[in-house]
Image (cartoon, grey):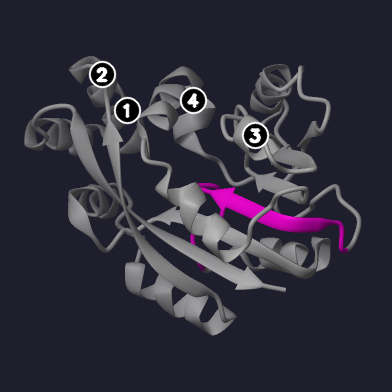
Amino acid sequence: MARIAKGAVPSPNIWNSPQVYEVENRAVDPEGAVEAAMRAIRPWDGATVLDIGCGTGYHLPSFAATAGRVVGVEPHAGLAALAASRCSGLPDVVVRTATAQDLPLPDSSVDVAVARWAYFFGPGCEPGLRELARVVRRGGAAFVVDLDGARGDFGRWFRQSVPSYSPEAVEEFWSRQGWQRRELDLRMTFSSRADLEAVLRIEFAPAVAETAIGETEGLEIFYPNVLRWRHF
């Protein structure tokens, strides 16, 4: 069993099914809307970028294409090893096994921090926010990319799978923290129904996943997200 960093918040989809999650990563946002939206707020050319909850490192090479240095942090040691292997030919990328609430980085050492579908779901993530305030230097920015649980079929399926989740409470939390927000209308586009169905089955409770499969035609899913950010 892979080592898990102390205090990690489990991520059942990628922790249990990394190969299917890889399919999901390839399907999400073919237009690159997330990166374009973040770059419009705070570009990272030549900068130090921190990817919190980097998983198998899917997004690290994209950051490394223009950043000066990239650090991936992932609490699941097995996934962190896959991320390190993926970036073995990129000398300016390092991967560390650690949690968002205990980042292995010096104070004021990061220009842009990104948490994409990782750890930050509103109330309860205060320790991670304090770490962001510690490691992001003046003039930097932090981004959180998250599912918009209040919109679309995907949001409805998520709420059915996690009844304790309250979109209203999440919005109130981020508003109190002083973060800005922008809705992102993303999509997932798959090459086969088998891939689409496999992804739905790792994202939702079993009964909800079967409902979602039955309600979804074709090879595309509307995937409503929220981009949140704060300048430092």
Q: Distance from label 2 to label 1 (Cα)?
A: 12 Å
Region rendered in magenta: 108-122
Which residue is pictured at 45% across the width and 71% down the height?
181
Q: Quadrant of residue 220?
A: top left
Percent position (x, y) of residue 140?
73, 65
Q: Quadrant of the N terminus?
A: top right
Label 2 crowding class (10 Å Cα cut-off): few <14, some 14-19, many 20+? few
Element assignment for label 4: helix
Query: Is residue 133 shown left or right of residue 86?
Result: right
* Mark 4: amino acid: Asn
* Mark 3: amino acid: Leu
Residue 109 belongs to magenta span:
yes
Which residue is pictured at 25% across the width and 32% down the height?
206
Q: Quadrant of the C terminus?
A: bottom right
**Residue denoted by label 1:** 199
**From the viewer's perspective, is the residue at label 2 or at label 1 nearer?**
2
Element assignment for label 3: helix
* Mark 1: amino acid: Val
Sequence-first disc among 1 and 3: 3
**Residue denoted by label 3:** 60
Q: Is residue 7 visible?
A: no
Residues under numbered marks 2 and 1 in contact, where contact means CB atoms less than 8 Å apart: no
Element assignment for label 1: helix
* Mark 2: amino acid: Ser
**Residue denoted by label 2:** 191
Q: Which mark is residue 16?
A: 4
Sequence-first disc among 1 and 4: 4
Sequence-first disc among 4 and 3: 4
Residues under numbered marks 3 and 2 in contact, where contact means CB atoms less than 8 Å apart: no
Q: Distance from label 1 to label 4 (Cα)?
A: 12 Å
Sequence-first disc among 2 and 1: 2
